Amino acid sequence: MVPVWKRVAVAIGAVSLAAVAVLWQPHVVAAYSAPNPDPGSAEFYTQKVKPIFESNCFRCHGGVNHRGGLTFDTQAGLLKGGHDGAVVVVGHPEQSLLVKLIRHEGPADDPMPMPPKGDKLSDADIATVSAWIKAGAKMPDAQ
């Protein structure tokens, strides 16, 4: 015969597991059913584009670092461009130097693949940046 304390322990464990599953479910559902923000929104920049820039661009083109005269941490700075001119042509990712550089398809005389060290951005990241530029390259006012 199984001692009472073991039956109680198993029952408590089962109830605890069920409670965790019930309480966790709304978070899982919310995470998977949250709509993607529109590429033309500042939210899209914050959720999708900024993390790409933070991981790959801000070290040289953010904060106090403006290598090549280019800064990625304000919309005005990004749209102004750097020493080589504009890097973003709003509405036209295929004409934007930024997209050419992250695709490693820069100008033949000075290809400047970006990021300069490490791997090329993933196709998904390039598509995200391209969609953002095509939709207006909007950033939140506080950026």
Image: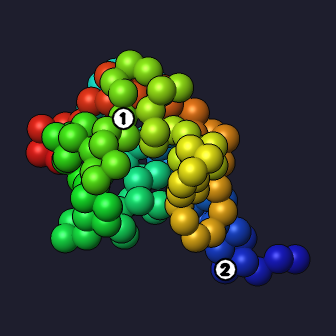
> Residue 33, image x and y in percent?
52, 28
Q: Residue 22 or 30: which is nearer the viewer?
A: 30
**Residue beneath label 2, please?**
5
**Residue at screen point 37% across, 40% down:** 87
What is the secondary structure assignment of the residue under circle 2? Answer: helix
Residue 60 showing in the rendered view: yes
**Residue at screen point 56% across, 44% down:** 107
Q: Which mark is residue 88?
A: 1
| Dot 2 or dot 1, earlier in sequence | 2
**Residue at screen point 25% across, 64% down:** 66
In the rendered image of this protein, does residue 41 appear above or below residue 125? above
Residue 10 is left or right of residue 42, and the answer is: right
**Residue at screen point 58% across, 70% down:** 117
Residue 21 is left or right of residue 54, and the answer is: right
Dot 1 amino acid type:
Val
- Separation of marks 2 and 1 at Cα, in angstroms: 68 Å
> Residue 51, image x and y in percent?
42, 53
> Residue 5, image x and y in percent?
67, 80
Q: Which mark is residue 11?
A: none
Q: Residue 41 or 14: which is nearer the viewer?
A: 41
Q: Answer few, some or many: residues within 10 Å of disc 1's Cα (few below 14, many 20 plus, some between 14 and 19).
A: many
Query: What residue occupies the far front of the structure in this picture?
Result: 109
Residue 91 is left or right of residue 10, and the answer is: left
What is the secondary structure assignment of the residue under circle 1? Answer: loop
Q: Quadrant of the N terminus?
A: bottom right
